[in-house]
Amino acid sequence: MDVLERIDSYKKEMVSAMVKMIAIPAISPVSGGEGESKRADFLEDLLKKMGLEVKRFDYKDEFGKIRSNLIVEYGKAAQRIWILSHIDTVSPGDLSLWRHDPFDAYVKDGKIYGRGTNDDGQGVISSIFALKAVKESGVDPKFTFGIALVADEEVGNEYGIKKLLKEGVFSKKDLAVVPDWGRPKGDEIEIAEKGILWLKFRVVGKQVHASTPEQGLNAYRVSVKLLDLLDNALHKRFGKADPLFEPPKSTFEMTKHEKNVESVNIIPGTETFFMDCRVLPNYKLDNVVALVKNISKRVGRQTKARIYVEVVSRDEALKPLPKNAKIIQILQRSIKQVKHKEARLVGIGGGTVAKFLRRYGVESAVWSSQDDVAHQPNEYAVISNMVEDTKIFASMFV
């Protein structure tokens, strides 16, 4: 039995492993959870039962919770390829929108439903069973097969990939595939990510009764004016398009808005809101921040409001991975072998752990076959995609 045939025989075992894994919530303490340690216990046991040696990296966070990462290496080839997935998940959100308990995964119509099945359970299970197939086939892999199951991807990466890079787990000679984004047909490989900038605005006016607006300063009205000016100015100043990316332009979106007043007849004296900016690599985030602050100062002078701008989070974009990079060639060849498709190269506005690996010097591609249901109620993974992805990962090594 060859490697790919073995993977077909693993289908029921893979589904069972996914269902058992999803039953163990792995939500960050920042979002009210307990972290990943119990899920890591399950995965460590699964890997050891396959005869694999597991290295575990546990870190205690600011809440006193243990954040767990698992590392496996198999083979003695000179160069390593890592399949790197994250084992934490976002919270389920509004439970009324779920048709079923999000942590009681179930199978229906060829899909496994549950929180974290798609993001990033499919990558976790596919990487593990790809290694199982390579090991049980008895072949010497062309590359040392590395599996990295990391913590804390959903809320900052402080106890996951950032820690592992400091530990020296990865080498700049390594290659990596991050199965944390994909298209339903699995025919696109992500080689670039936009810069990410989160901004917090606090507009301070004067709260008064709504019947006497002249006695106060409506912070809501100032905020609307400010946002309109920012929306127009940012899209104009940073308006170039790059066809590599989807969408092709930088985006500047008003998102979270904090509660202001309790009653309709009160003019708010304070408004707090946020913007999410996804910026193409040819622009510097410092220039975005500078424009935002200049406009905010001008509106403040015109309206007499005090406007405070805070950078909540920022991550500068890197240059796209070269199209002839070795990991791209390997992955494209495997996709063609299994799917009989030519995979095109794209950039995205989302962020993955690949950016940390790329910044460190590790050639990293982001790829999987998945529907766009991450972070949504009734999230699911398509079983046939999971099995096929497993074959593609395995074929990279044999």
Image: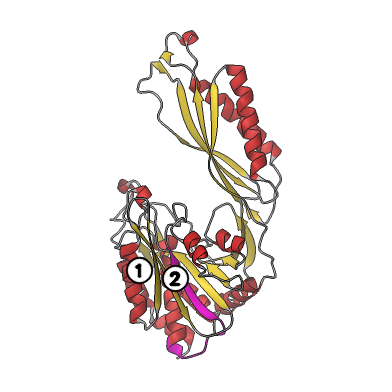
Res 143 seen here: yes
Distance between the alpha carbons at the discs numbered 2 and 1: 10 Å
> Which disc number belongs to residue 365?
none
Find disc 2 in the rendering and name its residue: 386
Asked whether 322 falls inside the magenta stretch, the response is no
Residue at 47 percent of width and 56 percent of height: 157
- Left or right of 307, for residue 262: left
The outermost residue toward the front is 167
**Amino acid beneath label 2:** Met
Identify the element where label 1 is drawn: helix
Q: In the rendered structure, which segment of residues is drawn in magenta?
A: 136-150
Can you give x and y, in whole percent of width and height, for residue 297 in the image? 62, 25
Residue at 60 percent of width and 67 percent of height: 362
- Left or right of 239, for residue 340: left
Q: Nearer the viewer, residue 54 or 224?
A: 54
- Left or right of 350, for residue 65: left
Question: CB atoms at circles 2 and 1 under 8 Å apart?
Answer: yes
Can you give x and y, in whole percent of width and height, for residue 99 in the image? 31, 53
Find disc 1 in the rendering and name its residue: 18
Residue at 28 percent of width and 61 percent of height: 104
